[in-house]
Amino acid sequence: MRTRIQTIADGAKLAARAILEFGSHLVNPTVRLGVTGLSGAGKTVFITALVHDLMHGARLPVFEPLASGRIAGARLEPQPDDAVPRFEYERHVEALVRERAWPESTRRVSELRLAVEYQSHNGVERTLTLDIVDYPGEWLLDLPLLTMSYRDWSAQALKLSYDEPRRKIASRWHAHLETLDPDAHEDEQAALTAAALFTDYLRACRDARYALSLLPPGRFLMPGERAGAPAFTFAPLALDAEPAPAQKGSLHAMMERRFEAYKSFVVRPFFQEHFVRLDRQVVLVDALAALNAGPAAVKDLEATLAAILACFRPGRWTLASALMRPRIDRILFAATKADHLHHSMHDRLERILADMTAQAIERAKFSGAQIDVVALAAVRATREATVTRGRERLPSIIGVPAAGEAAGTEVFDGSTEIAAFPGDLPEDSGALIAGAAPFRGLSAGPAQHADYRFLRFRPPLEPTGPGSVALPHIRLDRALQFLLGDRFS
Ligand SMILES: Nc1nc2c(ncn2[C@@H]2O[C@H](COP(=O)(O)OP(=O)(O)OP(=O)(O)O)[C@@H](O)[C@H]2O)c(=O)[nH]1
Ligand SMILES: [Mg+2]
């Protein structure tokens, strides 16, 4: 009952804001673009490049409003939400173009407002306000918890953790779990240890060697200022299948209470403050990191993408249906860092991502949202060459690997340019995803035996004149055309 009343109250509050925002939208057309992806997927680089390119009128031939000369200019404006940190565009761009370094990792939501002056198709001068919201994909993966009980979540998390390679990684947490009796008296130390071991397991799964992605609760890996709060100190318990209510004062009741607190204080505010207000969404995916790690990571990524898409399906969420909108009408899945591959492989990378999302997209179709898939590099760090090895001609890439990157026994110093052959992606991506095309990744042994090895290259340097630097890209214009093109009509 409580949940229903709360749902109605939440719905009313959100609907009132929606009407307010709709009103101001008529006067001042605004697009709220959500940019998400798991940690390291390339969100900060994508937004920095997008803003830089719009402000400097970069070469974006497929982005029609800019290519046809209808966009006169873009400028940064104060962002509308006072409580949300600003996306530190200047600092990130400074790192990229002056220091030739990738921006630092950002672990929270941030926002930036850009005003774009343009001429409509019938010649009228207009301004489009573009609000860009950068938020961790891990937060998105928490949304399904809103409709889950502690019992459901425990069962799901346990089931997942018994599949290899997770089982091996989870062994210490599993051993502790066996010592816990859910009906025993509540015990803070037991909860603390369980939460710590469970978090260690999640963290180890995310390690580049395994690169697993489906790891809720997302905030366990990035708790911020709430670290140590009871809402972050819970873990799954092995509960009986029989759905008996938790006994008062038991460990089970304590964990359940904290799980509910996590939903109320962490997940629901994100949903209300950020998620429901988005108009367009780009989900950045580091598919190459999964290929680096091996088949289990590829399979895990596919499940993650399905979970992400399910978040955009209206009708499923009580809160969203109360809002009367599927507001997000375009979703783009983008495989990032395509510059780690020779251009002959870009289409294959795109196909791998398309196949990974195909089933989920099919299910989401009725929502009316348009979905597209692209392989891109927001900032292209490499050039291309064909390297002859004996009789073979290998399509290779040339770039400066970041300091500390290694290939075989060689460790790079961050200033030497090399040509690398990253490996051919398979033509038949379906087999790869179905696990029918076994390949070796980092999770299976030493790096030199892996089938794919994508190095981290330093950002490029391409001065185009005194004081100005262009950021080369791959297919960023295609992404922009899909996400924003129609809004400049
Ligand atoms: N070559 C290349 N590397 C990229 C590109 N985009 C991102 N990267 C690499 O990926 C790393 C992570 O990119 P970020 O933009 O910081 O990723 P993020 O999603 O913001 O990550 P968090 O802030 O940690 O959540 C960078 O440090 C780069 O090494 C790209 O377009 N090309
Ligand atoms: Mg970031």
Image (cartoon, rainbow, N blue to C red):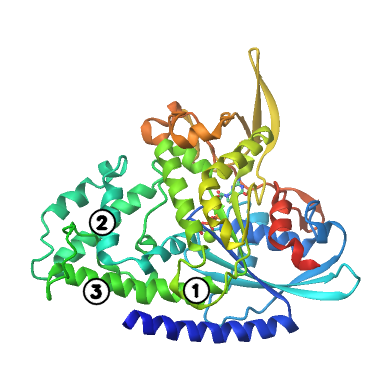
Q: Residue furthest top?
A: 391
Give the residue type at disc 1: Ser
Mark 3 surroundings: few (<14), some (14-19) or many (≥20) residues within 10 A: some
Give the residue type at disc 2: Ala
- Read off the residue under disc 3: 257
Question: Percent from the top left, x then y, of residue 35?
Answer: 58, 62
Kindly indicate the quadrant of the structure image that contains residue 226: bottom left
Q: Label 3 to label 1, Cα distance in Å?
A: 26 Å
Tell me, for residue 321, which label it has, or none.
Answer: 1
Residue found 58% across the figure and 29% down from its top = 424
Q: Is residue 407 left or right of residue 230?
A: right
Looking at the image, residue 346 lies above or below residue 223? above
Mark 1 surroundings: few (<14), some (14-19) or many (≥20) residues within 10 A: some
- Read off the residue under disc 2: 155
Residue found 63% across the figure and 82% down from its top = 21
* Element carrying mark 2: helix
